[in-house]
Amino acid sequence: MRLGSVNYEIRGKVAILTMDEPKKLNALSAGIRAGLLEGLAKVDADDAVRVAIITGSGEKAFCAGADIGAFDFDPEKARNFMAETFELLSAPEKCKKPVIAAVNGVAFGGGFELAIASDFVIASDRAKLAVPEIKLGLLPAFAIVRLADIVGRAKAKELSILGEPIGAEEARALGIVLRVAPHEKVLDTAVEFANQIAERPRLSVQMAKSFYNRGLGGDEMRHTLDGFPYLFMHHDAREGIASFKEGRQPKFKE
């Protein structure tokens, strides 16, 4: 089944949502955002589905992050864009059933954030993960309020301020990734794990997720949503995004 730019497949008690714009490295286009939201809503509504897996099509990328070509520097439009993005990135957390991210390649920016919004991350041994927004004069809005809880404050600052990618094994050591699998077996490994979860008592599993996720999505999200659009007004953000589109090094003023 096709939902926007996402393929939706049922395997027994497991739903697999595959972002399917490989030529764009599965960047978070309108089609992918709509497809993931619809797919996770279907997961919640289908009593036969116990677990969801999110993955990317192609050999290179899970998800390369936001579709930078769609960025608009008007603060109100930037805020609306971020509100839509937050709705997507909070959807795996809000889904009452466990969500596994099968990270089969690059997971940058919003792709990284989609992974950490999931309950578990199974990563390919070729995966690279990063929050590189700083290189555009921006910051990773969702990760700002989530990453420190996973890796600690100092490491979260380092990842966000340097914006450099890390490999799957380092991400596992930091607690971002649960398991690392051979590249060609990452989805099979995620499905095997999902099937294990699916055999546990349904209500107990859902309550465990709910209890561990208590407190997520509070005031910190609202403050981030209100404050971050103003970064788009700064010269460095305009220069960073322009240089990315033009394939050159940015020349930041500050």
Image (cartoon, helix red, strand yellow):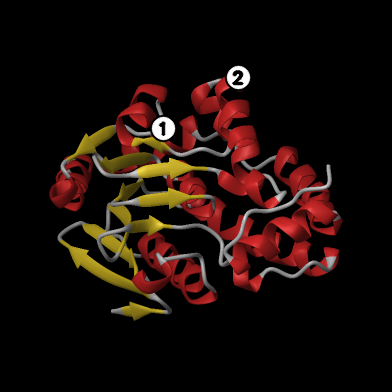
**Mark 2 touches mark 1? (CB < 8 Å):** no
Closest to the observer, 1 or 158: 158
Up the image or down, 120 lies above or below 54; here it is above
Image position, residue 17 (x, y; %): 32, 64
Is tag 2's residue or tag 1's residue first in the polypeptide sequence? 2
Q: Quadrant of residue 55?
A: bottom left
Q: Residues within 10 Å of mark 1 (few under 14, many from 20)?
A: many
Image position, residue 147 (x, y; %): 56, 33
**Secondary element type, mark 1:** loop
Up the image or down, 52 lies above or below 204; here it is below
Up the image or down, 110 lies above or below 30; here it is above
Residue at 57%, 64% (x, y): give it. 247
Residue at 19%, 41% (x, y): give it. 193
Q: Is residue 145 visible?
A: no
Q: Amino acid at mark 2?
A: Ala
Residue topped by disc 2: 154
Number of numbered callouts drawn: 2
Residue topped by disc 1: 176
Horizontal side of 109 relative to 57 (left or right) equals right
Horizontal side of 189 relative to 85 (left or right) equals left
Image position, residue 151 (x, y; %): 50, 24
Residue at 50%, 73% (x, y): give it. 34
Up the image or down, 42 lies above or below 138; here it is below
Horizontal side of 139 relative to 234 (left or right) equals left
